[in-house]
């Protein structure tokens, strides 16, 4: 058993109005010193077997096919623990 | 002669399929219901992908619908020239399926926008817009939370240079790049737009115009003359 994390973020050049709204809310709550916030998605993938190269290649394929829209989003894959 | 047959697709969460079917009927074509879970286009002459919230917009709008069994049939058929129109969620699905370039993202304002929208028909040489005059201004309803069209700078430049921006907002409601409301593929048979032609076909229901009829008369004319 292994857990693989896929983080999906909007590409830097794509406007993220949700992140901007969060950034604007922070000072109102007393949090200062934040220059930018960008919001993304985190997927926790539980594998039946070990997170070997074959399994990770499959996860990357999942990310490419479904989890991320690579037209507007980047993704990273890492093994947790 | 049998009437032109236009398929109207229903996914779980589709809302506008009945209006689309009625619009098809109003111009004298036959609306054929298509079900997302079927591997069957029922031999239709064209397909309308209506708006709504297919699969609850889970993950991204249109991301799950793209893999519906019906799409396994529709994607190759569209690539082979079958006329396809996607409005709103249908446009999002066409982008997720890579039948059209770019993507639809959260409105810049973060607000759901529901209003009568003036747009300009920039291209009347597509399967779905031939009934309009080049540059004709029309009014259609828009209603969406994720309608901001984005694409890479190269893609935008190519769309503009090759005349593939079909409909452009006059007064941008969502922050779309270049005020783009709708685009077409290279062949001109696949068109996607955020505004709703199928909600602007009858004065009786308080539509802002009947300008939407032009999309349906365009496809009918094409199919009958084919």
Image: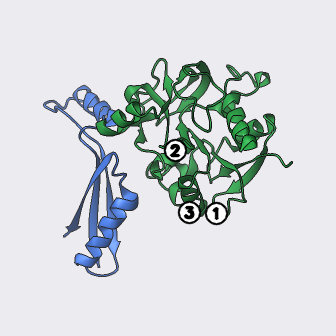
Of labels 1 and 3, earlier in sequence is: 1
Residue B72 tag number: 3
Instruction: Measuring from the top left, give residue B25's x and y in whole percent.
Output: 80, 39
How far, Cα to Cα, is label 3 from label 2? 20 Å
Number of numbered markers: 3
- Pick the quarter of the image with the C terminus of chain A: bottom left
Judging by the rendered image, the residue that carries numbered circle 1 is B37
Circle 2 crowding by C-alpha within 10 Å: few under 14, some 14–19, many from 20? some
Label the blue chain with its letter: A
**x then y, percent, for residue B60:** 44, 49
Determine the secondary structure under disc 1.
loop
> Can see residue B137?
yes
Task: Examine the rendered structure and indicate whether residue A76 appears above or below residue B126.
Answer: below
- Write the residue at 45% across / 51% down: B98
Write the residue at 27% across / 28% down. A24
- The residue that disc 2 covers is B187
Whole-Å distance between the Cαs marked 2 and 1? Answer: 28 Å
> Which of the two marks, 1 or 3, is nearer to us in this view?
3
């Amino acid at each position: 058993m292994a857990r693989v994390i896929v983080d999906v973020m909007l590409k830097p050049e794509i406007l993220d109005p949700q992140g901007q709204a969060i950034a604007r809310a922070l000072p109102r709550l007393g949090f200062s010193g934040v220059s930018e916030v960008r919001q993304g998605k985190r997927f926790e993938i539980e594998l039946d077997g070990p997170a070997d190269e074959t399994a990770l290649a499959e996860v990357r394929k999942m990310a490419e096919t479904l989890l991320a829209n690579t037209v507007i989003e980047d993704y990273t894959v890492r093994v947790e623990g | 002669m049998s009437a032109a047959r236009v398929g109207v697709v229903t996914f779980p969460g589709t809302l506008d399929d009945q209006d689309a079917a009625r619009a098809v009927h109003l111009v004298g074509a036959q609306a054929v219901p298509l079900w997302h879970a079927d591997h069957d286009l029922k031999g239709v002459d064209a397909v309308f992908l209506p708006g709504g919230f297919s699969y609850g917009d889970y993950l991204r709008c249109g991301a799950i619908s793209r893999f519906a069994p019906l799409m396994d049939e529709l994607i190759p058929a569209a690539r082979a020239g079958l006329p396809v129109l996607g409005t709103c969620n249908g446009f999002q699905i066409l982008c997720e399926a890579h039948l059209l370039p770019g993507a639809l993202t959260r409105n810049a304002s973060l607000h759901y926008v529901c209003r009568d929208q003036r747009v300009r028909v920039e291209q009347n040489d597509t399967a779905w817009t031939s009934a309009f005059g080049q540059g004709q201004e029309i009014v259609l309803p828009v209603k969406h939370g994720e309608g901001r069209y984005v694409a890479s700078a190269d893609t935008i430049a190519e769309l503009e240079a090759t005349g593939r921006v079909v409909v452009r907002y006059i007064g941008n409601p969502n922050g779309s790049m270049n005020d783009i409301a709708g685009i077409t593929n290279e062949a001109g048979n696949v068109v996607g737009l955020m505004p709703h032609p199928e909600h602007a076909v009858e004065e009786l229901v308080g539509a802002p115009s009947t300008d939407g009829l032009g999309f349906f008369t365009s496809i009918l004319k094409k199919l009958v003359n084919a």
